[in-house]
Amino acid sequence: MNPRLARISIFPIKSLDAYEPERAEITPSGPIAGDRRYAIVDSEDEYVNGKRTPAVHRIRASYDGLDRVVLSTPESDPREFSLGDDCDPLTDRLTEHFGDPVELVRDEVGLPDDTDLAGPTVISTATIEEVASWFDLSTGSIRRRFRANLEIDGVPAFWEDQLFSDHGHVVDFSVGDVRLAGVNPCQRCVVPSRDPDTGEEMANFRERFVEKREETRPEWTDSDRFDHPFRLMVNTRVSEAGEIEVGDRVEIRGERAE
């Protein structure tokens, strides 16, 4: 095997589309620099995301670096907005789309769902291809449904399940010069079952996923952290920060006590 970093995905606005640079900085606090820097919140200060608001899926976002975003919906033409000091025009556009007042909140450290395991999430290209085959979906659709930060090629499906161990232990691995600790297989929610363009839910997605995950589960996924099959990709913590680049070698360095 020759594990290499194949793709970097940063989500500048939580729950919207990814920005895919060739290189990125892994910060000491955990997230990739710029990942989930912004989040949309409602009048109750709750996240507006795919778990609670299917209308999120109807927004398309593309980026010019981390400072500009172009938004469009099926009902509106593309429009460019600043991701700088004045986000009022972007906030107004999002309020119009959702039909209720929303705000953008910003945190330079990032706003991940799991603040304890804030490092980049990891999956393999072969895993994406395998899961796509279960549902007759494209690999692009599966990427957008599961939303991993780092994608590794040159390895078999579910190779990333070697990046976690039993409770009380982590698995050290490196991406180029960056050191990460793999901790937990990521528990999935309703979002992967929804069409990333329309929000329409696929019937029996979870049941089919669980059935196939159990059928194809490699021996190396024998861990007490893997308590149910509706898990995919790996949550990490950062041990040594630095810059990563597509093509970087990925190396498992070994298990240690957490």
Image: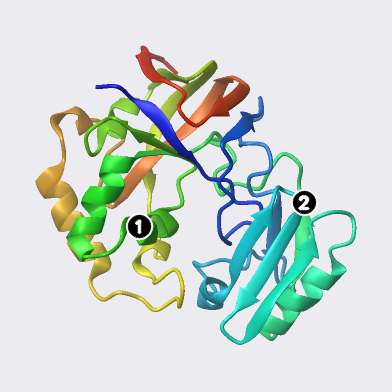
- Extreme right residue here? 85
Q: Position of residue 132 (x, y in %)?
A: 25, 57
- As drawn, the label of residue 142 is 1
Q: In the image shown, does 228 or 48 lie closer to the viewer?
A: 48
* Coordinates of residue 219 in the picture (x, y in percent): 14, 30
The residue positioned 49% from the left and 32% from the top of the image is 246
| Cα–Cα gap, marks 2 and 1 | 27 Å
Local secondary structure at mark 2? loop
Asked if 43 appears above or below 218 in the picture, the reply is below
Residue 164 seen from this side: no
Q: Secondary structure at mark 1?
A: helix
User: In the rendering, at what x and y percent does residue 36 appear?
Assistant: 64, 49
Residue 52: x, y in percent? 53, 71
Query: How many labels, in total?
Result: 2
Q: Residues within 10 Å of mark 1 (few under 14, many from 20)?
A: many
Q: Can you name the residue that lies furthest to the left here?
A: 215
Q: Is residue 67 above or below residue 173?
A: below
- In this rendering, would 201 be left or right of 81? left
Residue, disc 2:
67
Tell me the quarter of the image containing the C terminus.
top left
* Res. 197 visible in picture: yes
Q: Which image quadrant for residue 82?
A: bottom right
Tag 2: amino acid: Asp
Residue at 62% x, 21% y is 241
Amino acid type at image mark 1: Ile
Q: Quadrant of the N terminus?
A: top left
Determine whether, in the image, residue 192 is placed left or right of residue 134: right
Identify which residue, 83 or 111, lies in the foreground. 83
